[in-house]
Amino acid sequence: MITLQIEHQVRDFDMWRRAFDSDPLGRAASGVRSFRISRPLDQQDYVMLEMDFDTQAAAVDFLGRLQNDTWKTGVTAPALVGEPSTRIIETVAIENVAAPERELR
């Protein structure tokens, strides 16, 4: 799995979320399989986003469209503060480390 990670400060999280939810680039049609939105507990004006793709090419293409079509002129531009930090990563392992439930007798 290939993941596009994006981090950036926002003026207002609710404004950013409305813009994100409007899906101006068509995430599903662009190859996004799933996404996760996170933010630090002590920093409500900071967003961390991870979007999963099947291929590196799809992630690179989507990032380019974000940079050129959305962040500079698109609907999310007013919500952003500064330049987003981005990277494309590859998942190499996923393990479940939760202990199995014990049987009660």
Image (cartoon, rainbow, N blue to C red):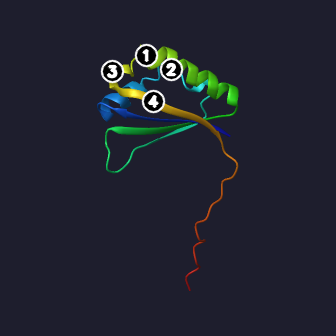
Kindly identify which residue carries mark 1: 72
Evaluate if marks 3 and 1 touch, with contact meaning CB atoms under 8 Å apart.
no
Task: For mark 1, give the secondary structure.
Answer: loop
Please give the name of the residue rendered at 57% of the width and 37% of the height, measured from the top-left corner: 34
Q: Which amino acid does label 2 sit on?
A: Gln
Closer to the camera in the image, 23 or 72: 72
Report which residue position mark 3 lands on. 78
Say which amino acid is labelled 3.
Pro
Q: Residue at x 70, y 48 (%)?
A: 92
Q: Residue 76: which quarter of the image?
A: top left
Assess disc 1: are there few (<14), some (14-19) or many (≥20) residues with their C-alpha within 10 Å of its C-alpha: some
Q: Can residue 25 be seen at all in this image of the molecule?
A: no
Q: Marks 2 and 3: CB-CB under 8 Å?
A: no
Q: Residues within 10 Å of mark 4 (few under 14, many from 20)?
A: some
30 displayed left or right of 70: right
Q: In screen coordinates, is 25 left or right of 18?
A: right
Give the residue number, with chain letter if any, for mark 4: 84
Residues marked 4 and 1 touching at CB (< 8 Å): no
- Quarter holding the N terminus? top right
**Residue type, numbered disc 1:** Lys
Q: Nearer the viewer, residue 60 or 33?
A: 60
Identify residue for label 2: 67
Q: Is mark 4 on a helix, strand or loop?
A: strand
Please name the amino acid that badge 4 sits on. Pro
Q: Disc 1, disc 2: CB below 8 Å? A: yes
Q: Distance between the residues labelled 1 and 2?
A: 7 Å
The C terminus, quarter of image: bottom right
Identify the mark nearer the N-term, 2 or 4.
Answer: 2
